[in-house]
Image (cartoon, helix red, strand yellow):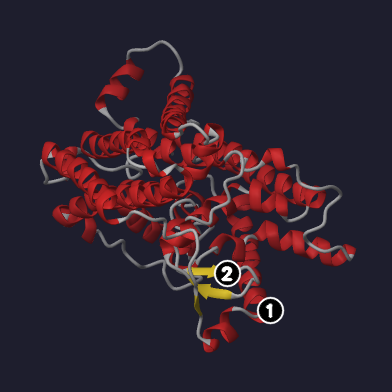
Amino acid sequence: MNQFILPMHGLGGGSDLPIPASMAIAAGTAALTLSFVVLLLAWRTPRFAGGPDRQVPIVLVRIFDTAGWSLLLRALGLLFFCFMLWPTLFGPDTLINPIFGVVYVWLWVGLVPASLLFGRFYRAVSPVRTLHLLVSRATGQPPSRGLRDYPARLGYWPAAIGLFAFVWLELVSPDSTYLGPLRLSIAIYVAVMVVGSAVYGDRWLERADPFEVYSTLLAHLSPWGRDARGHLVWVSPLRHLSRIPADGGLVAVVAVLLGSTAYDSWRDTATWIRFLQGSNISSTVWGTIGLLVAVAIVGVTFAAASMATGVGGVDRRQLPGRLAHSVVPIIVGYMVAHYLSFFIQTGQLTLIQLSDPMGVGADLFGTADWEVNYWLAQNPTFLATTKVLAIVAGHVLGVIAAHDRALEVLPKKHQVTGQLPLLLAMVLYTFMGLFLLFGA
């Protein structure tokens, strides 16, 4: 059954990308370095720490910032969740069951464009948040109130653990495309989120729900935001990005997101496959170790580079969290480069399968007879260019975000030399991303 996911779940080999690898890597590294030099010369004061936001036109506010709109989104999210329980619980344990595409494609990859375009998308449609609201309404308690306060020391750590568990299921587990393990994972997720929100209120969902945290981080690159009074506003994406709360565990979250995508590329390389074939140890064990190592490399290198940025008078321990928001554009670049064709092609297949979730020849939504469009695969030059540009653009935006925050937290005489360690780390990520893009 893994053939449903694995062959399409990757970058494609170097033969699929009609651009010389050395040229792409050199150009990407040069672009990153040049952008840093330009920033040093032309960007000498922080610009994202403050500044006014633009008010959203009142017509849009009356549509999108109302209780009725929120209720509609929650109803649609809960309705779709309940519909997917049908094939999840009773559908065939075969490749035609759409739950695999919904979870691994629409949810995991689809959250990227949805959150970039519409803001906190998962928060708006989350079935577990809706269940929490229903429970709060039934008990007469405000959704924000639980049995106790959410411990500040936990920060984003529960979400980081949940994200790692999900990517382990998707990328390492030999049973990732069997219904039994997926059913169990969904049940555990719902139970932990509902019970946790009952104990700690909706703050638990803001910091512990892996998909809400993931979506919210991406949403900070969208133009949709809220001001201090909670009003809907339009905000510059990079200014919006700088407002990500630097709570504990944020570095772990971005390390899991970036490291798991890098590992997904690495596991398709001939070197890794030959290593697994020549080992007497289970591929699941090696896969778990490989995933942990990939996440650790990202987390350790970023934390070390951020702390090396610190100078006298600056608390080095706080710097990784203060600078972690700069990794979010890099994550988006990796996700686009790695999953673009997978999302477009397998996403279409999932839409086709939704019309016949039980595999009995039904056509519930009129999509059962549709065919997958392979235009991207048939235009490799466009696909290769898009992937390379996504990685380079993500890193350039990351450098801009880090540079602006460095101007805010570093003493003036150290604002150049203090940024060099983080620049080196981002050059490493650029090289790694492009190397895996052409080497997978």
Residue displayed at 45% across by 42% down: 410
Compared to 133, does 33 lie above or below? above
Residue at mark 2: 226
* Rendered location of residue 67, percent (x, y): 68, 78
The crowd level at tag 1 (other Cα within 10 Å; few <14, some 14-19, many 20+) is few
Q: What's the residue at 65%, 48% (across, down)?
A: 207
Which residue, given by chain and number where applicable, does mark 1 sit on? 67
Q: Which mark is residue 297?
A: none
The N terminus sits in image quarter: top left
In the rendered structure, which amino acid carries the disc numbered 1? Answer: Ala
**Image position of 291 with respect to 77: above or below:** above
Q: How far apart in space, not on screen, are marks 2 and 1 (Cα)?
A: 16 Å
Q: Is residue 436 left or right of residue 421?
A: left
Label 2, secondary structure: give it. strand
Q: Quick check: 243 left or right of 369?
A: right
306 relative to 120 in the view: left or right: left
Looking at the image, can residue 422 be seen?
yes
**Looking at the image, is 371 positioned above or below residue 39?**
below
What amino acid type should be assigned to the residue bearing mark 2?
Arg
Q: Is residue 419 left or right of residue 207?
A: left
Q: Residue furthest front?
A: 413
